[in-house]
Amino acid sequence: MNIQELKNHFQQIKKYEAQDANELLDFVKKCYIHNEITTCEYRNLVYELESLGAKTPELESSM
């Protein structure tokens, strides 16, 4: 799966276009958790989305 296929899959499932790369990154993680994409596809898509500016929110330390 490439970014364009991901966008098409997102639109098919969600019924709207993704607003940014972060929204696609969240969707990729969901797809991976539900075994809809392989580990290799997940890694490649995360790398591509991060190069497009997607960021994973950092968790705040409770210490």
Image (cartoon, rainbow, N blue to C red):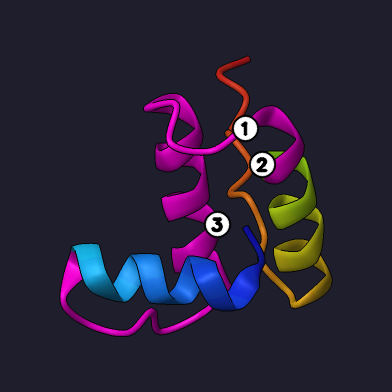
- The total of numbered circles placed on residues is 3
Residue sitting at x 44%, y 66%: 23
Residue highlighted by disc 1: 38
* Disc on res. 42: 2
Q: Given the current orientation, which residue lies at the most extreme left position?
A: 15
Label 2 vs label 3, nearer the camera: 2
Q: Image quadrant of residue 30?
A: top left
- Give the alpha-carbon distance from disc 2 to disc 3, as whole Å: 10 Å
Describe the element under mark 2 as helix, strand or loop.
helix
Instruction: Identify residue type, mark 1.
Output: Thr
In this rendering, position of residue 29 left or right of residue 40: left
Q: Given the current orientation, which residue lies at the most extreme top position?
A: 63
Instruction: Identify residue type, mark 3.
Output: Leu
Residue range highlighted in magenta: 14-41
- Mark 3 residue crowding within 10 angstroms, few (<14) / some (14–19) / many (20+): many
Q: Where is 44 relative to 61, above or below? A: below
> Foreground residue, 36 or 59?
36
The x and y percentages for residue 2 are 66, 66
Residue highlighted by disc 3: 25
